[in-house]
Image (spheres, grey):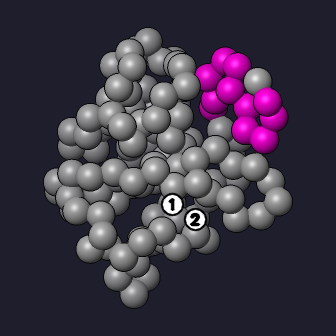
Amino acid sequence: MIRICPLSALPPGEALRVHAAQDAEPHPPIAVFHTEEGEIFAVDDTCTHQDASLADGWLEGCEIECPLHESKFNLRTGQVDSPPAKLPIRTHTVHIEDDHICVEMSDAQPNLPPGVKFGVES
């Protein structure tokens, strides 16, 4: 589990990009979102269509819109709500412990866009 930050450090409506190195394996960065409704979500911070940071996108409800080509993803499920992306983003489990946001990384393989590999020069 990765301890991200105090809950008060991520105001509602904001996102945070985190490099998720927790062991020797390279991991794509994750994005942690705090919705206006008070929910916290963590997903891989790479749009599955092209290499773009979802933390730089537009958050509305529990949906994030990619800043490059406007693909939309459901933060709860990772599913694509609007193309051009076709593959879902990987979601991670969020816990709040002692008023800190903590993320439990998924064991699933990330759906990275073509040409993007972490730990390998592309």
Residue depicted at 80% across the width and 54% down the height = 25
Q: Is residue 16 magenta?
A: no
- Residue furthest to the front in view is 121
Seen in the picture, residue 95 relative to 53 is either above or below; the reply is: below
Q: Would you say the magenta stretch is mainly helix, strand or loop?
A: loop
Which quarter of the image is occupied by the N terminus?
Answer: bottom right
Seen in the picture, residue 23 relative to 53 is either above or below; the reply is: below
State the residue in front, 63 or 57.
57
State the residue in front, 115 or 78.
115
Side of 76 where 11 appears, left or right? left
What residue is pinned by disc 1? 93
Residue depicted at 46% across the width and 35% down the height = 53
Side of 92 where 120 appears, left or right? right
Could you tell me which secondary element the residue under label 1 belongs to? Answer: strand
Residue depicted at 81% across the width and 34% down the height = 120
Three-letter amino acid code at disc 1? Answer: Thr
Which quarter of the image is occupied by the C terminus?
Answer: top right
Q: Is residue 117 magenta?
A: yes
What is the magenta range?
111-121
Locate residue 100: give its quadrant: bottom left
Residue depicted at 39% across the width and 42% down the height = 55
Could you tell me which secondary element the residue under label 2 belongs to? Answer: strand
Side of 90 where 41 appears, left or right? left
- Whichever of callouts 1 and 2 sits on the residue coming sooner in the sequence is 1
Seen in the picture, residue 49 relative to 3 is either above or below; the reply is: above
What residue is pinned by disc 2? 104
- Percent x, y of residue 8: 26, 74
Badge 1: residue crowd in 10 Å (few <14, some 14–19, many ≥20): some
- Percent x, y of residue 64: 33, 36
- Is residue 39 in sight in this rendering? no
